[in-house]
Amino acid sequence: MKYYTLENQFLKATFKTKGAELISLKKENTEYIWQGNPKFWNRHTPVLFPFVGALKNNTYSYNGETYHMGQHGFARDQDFELKEKEATKITFELAANKETLKVYPFHFVLQLTYTLTNNELVTSYRVKNTADQALYFSIGAHPAFNCPIDKNQTREDYVLKFDCDQTPASKKIEEGLIGNKSFPVFKHKGIIELTKNLFDKDALIFDPNPFSEVTLIHKATGKKELSIEFRNFPYLGIWSKNQESPFICIEPWQGIADNVNHNQELRDKEGILKLPKQQSFHCEYKISPGTLG
């Protein structure tokens, strides 16, 4: 496993080839990315591919064959190849191989490109279908941010402010799958308070997702600690491990876990993307720590 760094006048970002994962994002020596303390959760910003969330019974069917795969797919645990490295831009690539084909019978190329532009880190996903048949997949982001940013504070000292005043209910998770019930999470329009028991029912899942930007704000000072922008993502997850975990995940998704009533047929999976032969799919999100300057 190798490590690489990008740096400009505002930000310094560090990555590892395993999972092509962003493991550090610093501004003025402040670390914004969760550092993977295994006491709570040992990851940082994994890519979710070729599925988002859990499959019913960890199983799916395609063309009459049955396959098994764990939550969030395999890409986050694969060794990516470095394809391009510049001062403020880096691209990693994963292609289908003998091991992936055992659990996922599709030929693909997955590229993650990270670009520093002023006070933003842009994470870009590109999926290429290299076969002469349709490619079925989902892809999603799972970035974890330190919360609190200041160790003298607590997670409850912060709120999430969204870019519109809608107040969607969250889908209820049942044993890792999407249930048919929902529950309210907004006490104020466009704002979620990070209360201690917010994640007692697991992640918050908005389907459909009406938002395109979330800002982490310190309540007492009104200080904007970071924003994450994600346009045209149909699903959004918000998660932390438990009542004590000092991080918050803001997860824009192109795909979602199986519904409890799913028939396990891949073509019928909610949110599944169908990419025609020899075509490419692209999406991206942006992290902006603090304020510019």
Image: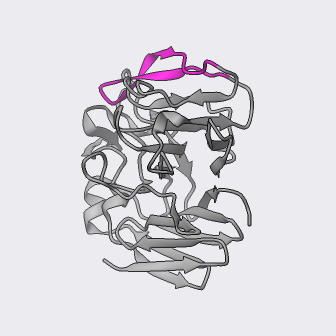
| Rendered residue at 38%/23% (across/down) | 201
Is residue 181 a member of the stretch shown in magenta? yes
Residue 201, placed above or below residue 14? above
Image quarter of residue 222? top right
Is residue 194 inside the magenta stretch?
no
Quadrant of residue 244 in the image? top left
Q: Where is residue 163 in the image (x, y as percent from the top left)?
A: 73, 37
Out of 115 and 55, give the one closest to the viewer: 115
Q: From this view, report whether residue 125 is shown above or below residue 235.
A: below
Image: 232 above or below 89 = above
Question: Total marks drawn?
Answer: 0
Residue 154 placement, left or right of 158: left
28 relative position to 172: left or right: right
Residue range of the region highlighted in magenta in the rendering: 167-187
Quarter in which the C terminus is drawn: bottom right
Q: Quadrant of the N terminus?
A: bottom left
Residue 129 seen from this side: no
Horizontal and vertical percent for residue 3?
Answer: 39, 78
Please tell me which residue is depicted at 42% across the width and 52% down the height of the picture: 50
In depth, the one of 31 and 249 nearer the eye is 31
Residue 61 appears in the figure: yes
Q: What colour scheme does the image use?
A: one colour
The percent coordinates of residue 97 (x first, y second) are 32, 69
> Where residue 96 sits: x, y (%)?
37, 67
Residue in the picture at 46% in, 49% down: 142
Examine the rendered structure and indicate whether residue 244 appears above or below residue 274.
above
